[in-house]
Amino acid sequence: MKPQLASEKKIYDFTKSLRHFSSLVEQEESKIDFAGIYPIHVRIEPTELCNLRCNFCIWHDEIRKEGIKDTVNMKNRFMDPDRLINLIKEFKTCGVQAVSFTGAGDPLAYPYMERVLDELHKQEICVGVTSNFSMPISTDLVELLAKCVWVRWSQNAGDSQSFRVIHNPKNNNSTFERAKTNLQALINEVKTKELPCEINSSVVVNKLSRGALENCIKTSDQLGIKTIQFRPDVPLNTDEDAISYEPDIIKEFDNIDFRNYKIVVDTNLERDESRQPDESVKNPSLACFYSGFTTYVAANFDVYPCCYTRIDKKYVLGNLKNQTFKNFWETPERISKFFDIKVANCPKCPHVSENEHLEKLSVEPPTRKFRKINRISGDKFF
Ligand SMILES: C[S@@+](CC[C@H](N)C(=O)[O-])C[C@H]1O[C@@H](n2cnc3c(N)ncnc32)[C@H](O)[C@@H]1O
Ligand code: SF4
């Protein structure tokens, strides 16, 4: 079956949960105190360590990381596992229902990932993990990953040669073959135990990876991965052209024989969205209501509103090393910072229109009676 043109394809929707949330609010109450809810989802960066130096990565590529050297102190830090385990328990008491792992480093380069996943599964918190998978990982870790709600392989390469060029591994232990072996073990585990884990792959498209696109699809297909997502390379300082696909890349997508394989070509990715004229921030005082129900914890336990603001420590909301999540979340300082974040002053934000919508539902002044948010049934993104 010939697919629709790549340029016309609808993207994976990062803001789906937010829209569900808005309709839930509309149905259940007329106004909500966004500063007075606990988050439903937390992104965790367990480490700044990574085994690779992907050419598109602001954290590890030698040239790109220059762009953040004045606003981020990257130190190969990783979370103290005991504090992280306690934090997970604290999340549970506050009603956090999902945790996803990403970061300035690679979650599977974190030496305590087995313990942490085990605790999350025990607490029945939904888990998603994004990783390059090219490092050695244990059988126990494979079993724990298989119990996650989703796992995303940052594939980016189609063979060993393109892997070396695109990913620039820091040592010989990280290889394309190893990533495939790890993914195969994970897929086998999911199949054998009939687990609901969704495994997909993502490929950042730029000048280096474009020659590998077809091989990326073949590799994923052979492994039994059901979905591959192509995303444009988003540089730190975006300009209009840099974040769109060049017309000849679009043509290349259209020439690939897609068969029945599910391929998502992202044409409207995250930071792109703020580029749309109707998405521009019309209200300079618009606050980030989104950051009331999802938040980001970095490897040194600094808390940021989201992964985009992680590139500048001026956005830090507080630190969780020496205080409980509940205490931190309820402090007047955190609440006042919540209202101080102005979408117009943020790095490129994908949630402009949602924030405009949520603003209309926001109660003023805040009630400060904290409450948990229920999981939205059928919503698979966390
Ligand atoms: C920064 S990485 C961190 C997690 C992990 N190390 C990994 O690579 O999956 C998170 C995701 O962002 C993607 N990414 C990194 N730099 C990007 C860029 N310039 N444009 C688009 N996506 C990018 C990666 O491919 C990965 O899927
Ligand atoms: S694997 Fe992830 S964190 Fe590591 S260099 Fe690549 S994109 Fe960056």
Image: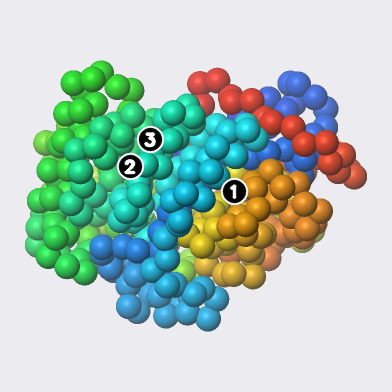
Quadrant assignment for the N terminus: top left
Residue 94 locus on image (x, y percent): 65, 35
Spatial CA distance of label 1 from label 3 is 22 Å
The outermost residue toward the right is 365
Per the image, label 2 sits on a secondary structure element best described as helix
14 relative to 155, above or below? above
Q: Which mark is residue 114?
A: 2
Per the image, label 3 sits on a secondary structure element best described as helix
**Crowding near pointer 1: few (<14 within 10 Å), some, many (20+)?**
many
Q: Which mark is residue 295?
A: 1
Image position of 287 (left or right of 133): right
Q: Which mark is residue 371?
A: none
Q: Nearer the viewer, residue 377 or 74?
A: 74
Q: Which residue is mark 3?
A: 118
The answer to whether one can see residue 198 in this image is no
Mark positioned earlier in the residue sequence (1 or 3): 3
Q: Nearer the viewer, mark 1 or mark 2?
A: 2
**Crowding near pointer 2: few (<14 within 10 Å), some, many (20+)?**
some
How many dots with numbers?
3
- Point 32% across, 78% down: residue: 62
- Point 42% across, 30% down: residue: 121
Ligand 1 occupies quarter = bottom left
The answer to whether one can see residue 338 in this image is yes
The outermost residue toward the front is 82
Per the image, label 1 sits on a secondary structure element best described as strand
